[in-house]
Amino acid sequence: MGCQTDQELLGIIERVKPLVAKGKVADYIPALKAADQSNVSAAVFHITRGSDVCVSAGDIEQKFTLQSISKVLVLALALIDQGYTNVFQKVGMEPTGDPYNSMIKLETSSHSKPLNPMINAGALAVTSMVNGNSPDEKWRRILHFVQCLLGGKAIGYNKEVADSEYKTTDLNRSLCYFMKQHGVIDGDVDELIDIYTKQCAIEMNCLDLSRIAAVFANNGRDPQTGNILIEEEVARICKTFMVTCGMYNASGEFAIKVGIPAKSGVSGGIMAVVPGKLGIGIFSPALDERGNSIAGAEILKIMAEEYHFSIF
C-alpha cells in the first residue's frame, strides 16, 4: 500500500515540532529510552477516496511498539471470542480519573472488578479472556488478528521491548495477583504477563496504524476489500471506550478539545478514528505528564479544528 506525502499534514507537523522539547520519552520501560524524541510522523487513511487512500508526513517507516494501543485490538478479539456478557462480567465500562496503572479502584470497587478495559488491570483481564489452549496459542491468535486488520501483512513484536517490560512490570503482576485472588482472572500470572508484554510490543509504523484505525472508522470492514473483520457492534464498543478512556486520565479534556475516538500508548503512538471517514496513525515519542504524545495530541487538535472532525 502506497502513501503520498501531504503538504497540509506536513505543515501541521512543522507547527507542532517545537512541542517535543516540552515532553519526555518514557523511561520506566528501559528499552523505550532509546527513542528519538524529535520524531514526529503521521499517516491518514481515507475510506472514501477510491485509490487515493493514504496521505502522510514525516518518517512514516519508523517502527514503534503499540503499548496501550494494543488494548483496543485485544478487546475486539476478546469480544469476538467471549461475547459482550462474558467480557463485561469481569471488566467494567466506566472511566477513571486515576493513572492507568493504579490499583486504588480495584480495592474500592464492588467485586474488585477493573473499571474499564483501557486501564492496565482491565486490559490484563481482557487479555486473559482470549481463546487458546496454551499461552502460545493465545499469543499467536492475537498476532494473527492484528495481521488480519492489516490486510494480511506480516508483522511481529519487538523482543527487546517485551523482555524489558516483562522484567520491570512488578506493578502489573500485583494487579494480576489481586484480581486472581478475587476471581477476575485465573491461570498462571507470569504466563499472562508474558502474553501481555508481547501484545504491547507488537511493532508497526504510522501507515500500518492508520489502516487499522480505518477498519474501526469503517465499522469493522476492511477499507480496501470490504470484508468484515470485526462485527459492527464490537467496533462500536471499542470506539466508545476510545472516547471515554483512550487518552488515559486526559480523556475528558481530549473529548472536548478534539472530539474523536483515540487511543494512545507510552511509546508515543496514537490511533485515532473519524467515523465513516478516515483512520489516523501518529508517532511522536515525547510524552506529556499523563503519558500521551504531546505533539501527537496537538496534531489531532489542529486537524479537528481545521477539518471539523469532532463527533459531538
Image (tube, helix red, strand yellow):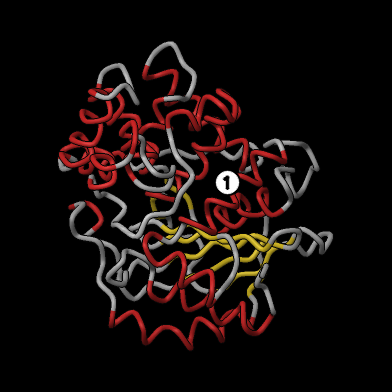
| Left or right of 22 on screen, residue 76 | right
| Left or right of 205 on screen, residue 224 | right
Q: Nearer the viewer, residue 24 or 291?
A: 291
Residue at image position (66%, 40%) is 151
Q: Quadrant of the C terminus?
A: bottom right
The local secondary structure at tag 1 comes to helix
Taking the view exactly as shown, the residue that stands out farthest to the right is 50
As displayed, is residue 171 above or below residue 23? above
Local crowd at mark 1 within 10 Å, few (<14), some, or many (≥20)?
many
Q: Nearer the viewer, residue 120 or 135?
A: 120
| Left or right of 226 on screen, residue 94 | left
List x then y, in percent, for residue 74. Answer: 49, 37
**Residue matched to label 1:** 238
Q: Nearer the viewer, residue 227 or 233?
A: 233
As displayed, is residue 95 above or below residue 256? above
Quarter of the image holding residue 12? bottom right
List x then y, in percent, for residue 237. Answer: 61, 44
List x then y, in percent, for residue 13. Answer: 50, 81
